Image (spheres, coloured by chain):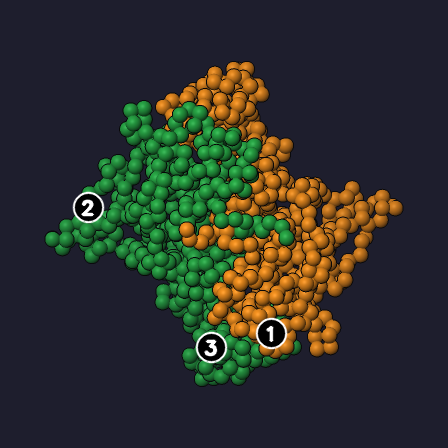
Chain colours: A orange, B green
Amino acid sequence: MSVVTSSPDTSTALLTDHYELTMVQAARQSGTADRRAVFELFPRRLPEGRRYGVVAGVGRALDAIECFRFDAASLAALEGVVDADLLDWLGSYRFSGDVWGYAEGEAYFPHSPLLVVEGTFAEAVLLETVLLSIYNHDSAIASAASRMTLAAGDRPCIEMGSRRTHEEAAVAAARAAYVAGFDATSNLAARARHGVPSTGTSAHSFTLLHDAEADAFRAQVQTLGVGTTLLVDTYDVAEAVALAVEVAGTGLGAVRLDSGDLGEIAREVRAQLDGLGATGTRIVVTSDLDEHAIAALAAAPVDAYGVGTQLVTGSGHPTCGFVYKLVAREGEDNELVSVAKKSLDKVSVGGRKYALRRRGPSGVAEAEVVGIGEAPADDGDPSTGLRTSDRPLLVPLVRAGEVVGRATLEEARARHRASVAELPRAVTMMSAGEPVIPTVFAG
Amino acid sequence: MSVVTSSPDTSTALLTDHYELTMVQAARQSGTADRRAVFELFPRRLPEGRRYGVVAGVGRALDAIECFRFDAASLAALEGVVDADLLDWLGSYRFSGDVWGYAEGEAYFPHSPLLVVEGTFAEAVLLETVLLSIYNHDSAIASAASRMTLAAGDRPCIEMGSRRTHEEAAVAAARAAYVAGFDATSNLAARARHGVPSTGTSAHSFTLLHDAEADAFRAQVQTLGVGTTLLVDTYDVAEAVALAVEVAGTGLGAVRLDSGDLGEIAREVRAQLDGLGATGTRIVVTSDLDEHAIAALAAAPVDAYGVGTQLVTGSGHPTCGFVYKLVAREGEDNELVSVAKKSLDKVSVGGRKYALRRRGPSGVAEAEVVGIGEAPADDGDPSTGLRTSDRPLLVPLVRAGEVVGRATLEEARARHRASVAELPRAVTMMSAGEPVIPTVFAG
């Protein structure tokens, strides 16, 4: 049995770009490797037309930092990449610095300082690639998922996209979707590793396997109970719905529609189910849904949405474009110096960042306030009742190398709900537009 | 230390949808689980505007089949998902059937039967999710990568997108890009696991870390040699190029440009380098390149392309939309029966498929011929010299559960080169269009 590509070892150290290591080697040459450094992970902008983003992957990133160790196999693989001196240094690598960041599930905007990583240059630069990979992927999924759950309102969304993305990305996508309000996933590894509830119906192959549709329905109901969801569009939908209720009775849990004009067919099926007395049988729809299709089905008698491709590909935006930039580092006099690349087309703002969400009357968010070098002041004044206290956004995640900011997925879900609820109403608009609140630099 | 999300164990069995298992449980109830079944993995269409696709992930899929075993931890995680009888069955699961498929690196077209999986329904349906995940992801990357390497011509392409995609998808993306003609990757895990050559330059943070650009350049050259690539756009490009040659000498390996109008700046830098005598110093460009940007730089004095975001996100098409459909299964009389869902909007063609690439005069591909139920006839007639023999596309990958079709990455690269070279010249067009050859059903 050869190496399994998707799950080789528990070290995350090689999920890293070649140049991170050679830069450390060169910085050791120039005596700058141990300079104190502050890196910031942030988005320069939201994806075109998006009104907000949602942070996910924080918990996975903390795991990745903890597991960022070069074991014997990793070091052996680096022969020829770096010199013996650096291999020796890597062998005892362990991140010993501090990390602050937005809590998982939090909304974000252009230039939100999602992570602030402080340590020596050498120890902090090594984390660049894996932190960006996790944040760029997971937040892209959560940002799309959040729009979908907003569009779905009270109706549950089920994540079913595993087959359309890399097999490990699928697990992370199920987790990120759950953070952003999805109710369940089809992915069993997400259930096993992260405790995301899993669920499933059946495929057309199951019906086609049987000599008659009735045989398939009977087998499923006998095995999984009448609460199961029967797939009714393999042959003729109306015949299948009649058959489903005949087999399972009026207590049938749900039927699934996976093709055609879903809104129109759902209306017909609802009428048919009600006519048969199966008034509690739910209608689940799937078939290349995205947030726009979900919104368009708002008036249709649909009870749940199964979302696949568009969820795991970020609904047009499969990556967030987060970058990880050095914003300050120790100078010759041992003081921190703000730094930034001078570029016209790629804006970076030097200096350590702080952030708060400015809230106005009734607690509605008004701005993303990013402080440079110092925390921006709260302009809330509860005594007058005219404004709500502003909300600081950076929480401690790692202190002296120890993870201190771990949250449960349920906490991340609650954070997502509260954070989105606090945003201006325009957040529910599915059309393209500007960020619902502006980013303001202060300090 | 908690569970690392990205690499938990060596079993691939939980990288699976919930319903695959419950369908098997129900099929055992109806006595159909052991019916002989043929599943087919295929694309209904190419992504909008694409003229061909490239198969990748074959080797990873074979690994995934071998490692698809339910160990004790997997079984424990399935308590509550399936019943004790099925847990018992899963405990001894091992795929014992046959698989044929397109070789890794091969071009594909709508309805190309990329994989044909034959076994019992139960054993074959369980592989659906993980096979689709691997093929849909890896082929999306290879299809985009192939267009980029075609656009780049003789100039090397370097994969640098790890930070923009899930950390494990990044490793698979580096591998798929290499199959499709990329020369190297930044990803160290792809080097360690798959032997993809890794390479790197340095980041702006490395320059910013130092008190002067000269200090950074000196450290890099002293550590990595004059053959290294210096990043010259942190401050002023012209000053940096002069400094780079001053520090490294005219033997400097390369300079990297990561912002601005790359074509215009490359011309200025080339003239400056030549004027300084550094005529052999190469120019590497990066910065959100895709196949169109690469093609647009064809006339510029650029020596290599570093490609990130657009590569790992499939350049607008992050997934291939491959499906895995039951196309034939054993009937009551023990004969195989062709089956297909009746649907107007999702075309599936029942029956076991065969495929060959029809080749005309000079060996240029003319059609993807898909035989239903039997292999299509070769219409080549080398004796007349007017046509070339057609080329069968399905190769044995697994026989009675044993992997027999493993190829090296170098073989996959050679297959990609040969397969693309055989296609009509329109394959090099970067504009949107129809597939360069039609798919024809026969038999």
Instruction: Please report, as a chain letter, where disc 2 is located.
Output: B
The local secondary structure at tag 1 comes to helix
Label at residue A27: 1
- The residue to which callout 3 is attached is B227
Q: Is residue B183 above or below residue B41?
A: below
Q: Residue at x 49, y 23 (%)?
A: A221
The amino acid marked with disc number 1 is Ala
The alpha-carbon separation of the residues under discs 2 and 1 comes to: 62 Å
Label 2, residues with CA under 10 Å away: few <14, some 14-19, many ≥20: some
The amino acid marked with disc number 2 is Asp
- The residue to which callout 2 is attached is B378
The local secondary structure at tag 2 comes to loop
- Same subunit, labels 1 and 3: the answer reads no
Label 1, residues with CA under 10 Å away: few <14, some 14-19, many ≥20: many
Mark in the foreground, 2 or 1: 1
Label 3, residues with CA under 10 Å away: few <14, some 14-19, many ≥20: some
